[in-house]
Amino acid sequence: MEDFERVYRTESDRIYSYIRMLVKDETLAEDLTQDTFVKAFQGQSHFRHESQTTTWLIRIARNVTIDYLRKRKPFLLFSLETGIHLESKEHVERSVVADEEAQELYKKISKLKRSYREVVMLRKIHELSIAETADTLEWSEAKVKMTLKRALEKLQVNYGSEEVFQDENKS
């Protein structure tokens, strides 16, 4: 029980910000974050430690969110605002200087289709490795690389010619 409380304290901001980017609604993101940790708590005996705890939690968060969106998709996808405000400590520390630019970038990311948003969030915002991202999304590493490449190209084409994120495939 103590271990799970520690996991909640260290990972809840990250899980919330991931879900927040997907659903674009603070209250809903809070509810889905809570649902994620309830499911994780109930399923902790099934966690085989083959992946990192963060990866496992993000996968649960993704599944909880997708299940919710499947039930509510027509309303949610077309009626929610696109403004994003992430509360993770790491994000706040990194974006103090460029908060307005960061908020604008999150708005742009939120307008991408879901698969692009997810891969950009996991790789570039949460800084998961390609293998961790593939594990979380249950994709191949090649699909992660290609989807990320396409998502970054879409951001550059639609929202300006400057490079938004450094592409690790370029030297």
Image: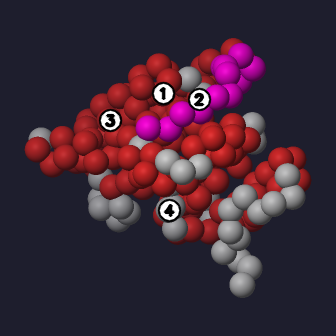
Residue drawn at the location 33% of the way across and 55% of the way down = 53
Check disc 2: other Cα within 10 Å, few if <14, some if 14-19, many if 20+: many
Residue that badge 1 annotates:
29
Q: Secondary structure at mark 2?
A: helix
Numbered label attached to residue 128: 4
Of residues 121 and 165, which is closer to you in this image?
165
* CA distance for labels 2 and 3: 17 Å
Residue 73 lies left or right of residue 91; in this view the side is right
Check disc 4: other Cα within 10 Å, few if <14, some if 14-19, many if 20+: some
Q: Earlier in the sequence, mark 1 or mark 2?
A: 2
Q: Earlier in the sequence, mark 3 or mark 1?
A: 1
Q: Quadrant of the N terminus?
A: top left
User: Where residue 168 appears, x then y in whole percent?
Assistant: 66, 75
Span shown in magenta: 76-87
Numbered label attached to residue 37: 3
Visible residue check, residue 5: yes
Q: Amino acid at mark 3?
A: Phe
Q: Earlier in the sequence, mark 2 or mark 4?
A: 2
